Amino acid sequence: MNKRQEKILATVVREYTESALPVGSKVLTEKYGFKESSATIRNDMVKLEKEGLLYQPHISAGRVPTDEGYRYFVEEIMEDKQLSLRDQKKLQAEVLKLRAQKSRMTRTMGKLLSSLSGSLVISGNEKEMHDFGIRELLENPEFKEVDEFCKVVEALDYIDENVNSILKRVKKGETQIFIGKDNPIKEISNCSMIVSPYKTEEGEKGLLAIIGPKRMQYAKNKSLLEYFKKILSGSAVIIVLINFI
């Protein structure tokens, strides 16, 4: 893949994430300022389709990323995103409030992460898991069909039974992104999942996961998840202090 084709793939991912509509060459040239002609862009999109990175849902439609297209974007193109110092300080203030109120951190932080990511969040440990944001997830057009809706709800009913299968797929201490059919919860293969294990200061092991449509904002959600992990493990305050130096 040449640089122009990488740029086309990245732009299709960006546009489809925002619009949930198939992306055509005209959108790329008119909205994103590609200097090449629409014909050149179309030819490159055809090549990306042949390589399995894009597909055309209908003959007259534009194209959308495949699981492999998203995977290439995440692993080869996407740049890691860091939360701004301002956002870190806001979250630290929320944490201090929660601790002052003696709230259950894992549960309450799961709610906060769901509201910030606009996605479904799973948090907890092997003994007790919580899920937040089912409404936010099901508001996405991908889940308007009754069958897709039922698959998600049914998977959540058995989320406790899926924890071990998720943990087996996650490397120790690492945040991992599972896309589409690579999702550890096979019943929701139309979703992507960002998963991060953590350990509290007391030594309790836990799991945080963001579940959303495959067109989720991967960089943003990964950065949120990793920062929440640092909060729960007690290392986030150090990061904030370092940023002041």
Image (spheres, grey):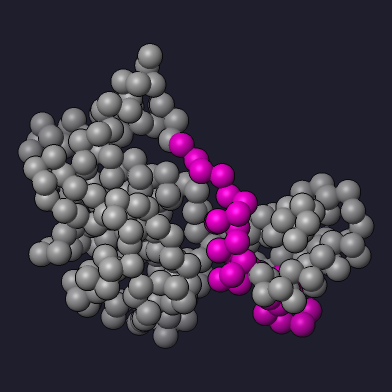
**Residue 21's x, y, as percent?**
65, 67
Q: Is residue 136 visible?
A: no
Horizontal side of 11 relative to 220 (left or right) equals right
Q: Is residue 77 magenta?
A: yes
In x, y percent, where is residue 204?
Answer: 12, 50
Residue at position x 70%, y 59% from top?
A: 9
> Toward which corner of the image does residue 54 lie, by quadrant?
bottom right
At horizontal 25% and vertical 34% (from top left) the residue drawn is 235
User: Outermost residue toward the front?
Assistant: 172
The residue sitting at 43% across, 65% down in the picture is 178
Q: Position of residue 244 (x, y in %)?
A: 37, 16
Question: Is residue 3 left or right of 230 when viewed as pictured?
Answer: right
Q: Residue at x 90, y 53 (%)?
A: 36
Image quarter of residue 165: bottom left
The image shows a total of numbered marks equal to 0
Compared to residue 231, the image places residue 215 above or below, namely: below
| Nearer to me, 236 or 27 | 236
Vertical placement of residue 151 versus 133, above or below: below
Q: Position of residue 57 (x, y in %)?
A: 67, 79
Q: Which residues are magenta?
A: 55-82
Residue extending furthest top?
A: 245
Screen quadrant of the N terminus: bottom right
Residue 228 magenta? no
Classify the position of the C terminus by image quarter: top left
Q: Is residue 151 left or right of residue 199?
A: right
Q: Quadrant of residue 124?
A: bottom left
Q: Is residue 222 above or below residue 183?
A: above
Residue 12 seen in this snapshot: yes
